[in-house]
Image (cartoon, helix red, strand yellow):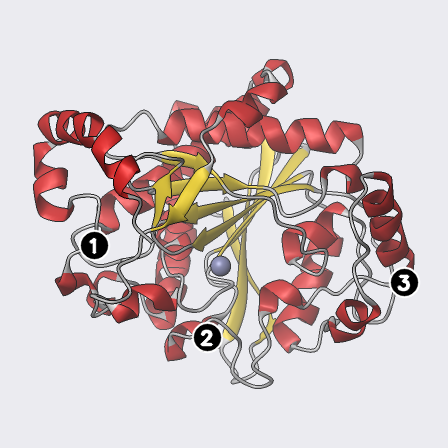
Amino acid sequence: MFNSRRRLLLVAPLVLATALVPSVANAEGPFVPPNQNTVNRASMLSAAEVESTLHSLAARSKGALRVEEIGRSGQGRPLQVAYIGTGETRIWIQGRIHGNEPYGAEASLDFLKTLVSGGNHAREVLEKITFAVIPLYNPDGYEAFQRQEQVHRVDLNRDWGVDRRIFDQINAVRASLGQPPLSENTYNNYTRHRAVESQAFWYAWADFLPHYMVDLHHQGTYYVDDTDEMTTFSVGISLDPGMLEPAQWDAVRRMGVVAADAAGKSGVVNVTRYPYINIPEGVTSASMLNGPGPRGEYANWRTSAMFFESRGGIGHKSSGYIVKQNVNGLWAITDAIADGSLASVDADRWSQIPPRGATIQTCDKFPQQCEY
Ligand SMILES: [Zn+2]
């Protein structure tokens, strides 16, 4: 639904944005041109290319980067985690848990490339931090270019289903906030590590026990709040704040703030705050809640986890800045953790990040645009 009042009010900022960044505005405007309907996968690394890139980075790193195959996907593709660093603080980065949301792989590999470069910056960071990087969480989904894995058609970001104990806590928090409880149906519909990918990555998570996690996604195409500009990048937290320990709630908001600041420094990037979402069965959520493993065991660990969402309408023209905004966000979080400045970031600035606005209704003209 296009709001004509909003359009009238916002002609001025749109013109201004066009003047400031003519190349992007001319090429794409705030809407997605028809030529981006056909997803151009030539700009995306295949599963085999991700694997070979990881191995060439490992070879170049002189032993600093270790690539481990932690299992196989439902269709037999390797599930790989790249480990690098000697620091005490542990950060987990994952991309492509949704098979049709590609650039988490390119962004995490770009990030790894700098880490293995041997420069001073990388060396300093690796003394403070150890990373587990998963460029391709869902290789079968990616090859089919579908959200789910391909054996059970499970959404891997809904397959770390929580147990009764956590579910009851969630409903207690909701009651205290005056919200209706999640239903028994919701609880019964959770899948709990049905997919082999979920099993393998839960055990890798439980072995690594990350302090921090960033999960890289794509979303549809949205406005920035009540403006006529298009969101290119959103930062999000996947749980009711009341479910988090106060230190976690501060940490994840601070991560979002520094990522938003860094990503937004480029003139072509419009950063927003992802709307309220509560998906306890998601990977970031369950990892924040000491969620149970495939055999009901516990890691006794709570990660501070958040996610990035890049705009939809992906194609070769926009891939450069879409990848870059993710890389900038990852570096901002990493640097703030490595130099200790994350602790002094004002967590309340989280609420000042502009909210993601309404969907850009291009479905009539560009139906594929709405598949994300
Ligand atoms: Zn996603």
Left or right of 250, for residue 122? left
- In terms of sequence position, does the residue under pointer 2 or pointer 1 come before the other? 1
Residue 32's tag is: 1
Quadrant in the rendering for residue 10: top left
Disc 3 marks a residue whose amino acid type is Arg
* Label 2 near ligand 1 (CB < 8 Å): no
Left or right of 274, for residue 3? left
- In terms of sequence position, does the residue under pointer 2 or pointer 3 come before the other? 2
Label 3's element? helix
- Measure the C-alpha gap from mark 2 to mark 3: 30 Å
Q: Position of residue 145 (x, y in %)?
A: 38, 74
Q: Position of residue 358 (x, y in %)?
A: 40, 47
- Measure the C-alpha gap from mark 2 to mark 1: 25 Å
Q: From this view, report whether residue 136 is shown above or below residue 88.
A: below
- Measure the C-alpha gap from mark 1 to mark 3: 44 Å
Q: Which residue is situated farthest in the top direction here? A: 344
Between residue 187 and residue 78, name the one nearer to us. 187
Instruction: List the residue tagged with mark 2.
Output: 141
Q: From this view, report whether residue 129 is shown above or below residue 156.
A: above
Label 2's element? helix
Between residue 232 and residue 90, name the one nearer to us. 232
Residue 228 visible in image:
no
Give the residue displayed 55% in from the left and 20% down from the top: 349
Residue 149's tag is: none
Of circles 2 and 1, the one toward us is 1
* Quadrant of the image containing the C terminus: bottom left
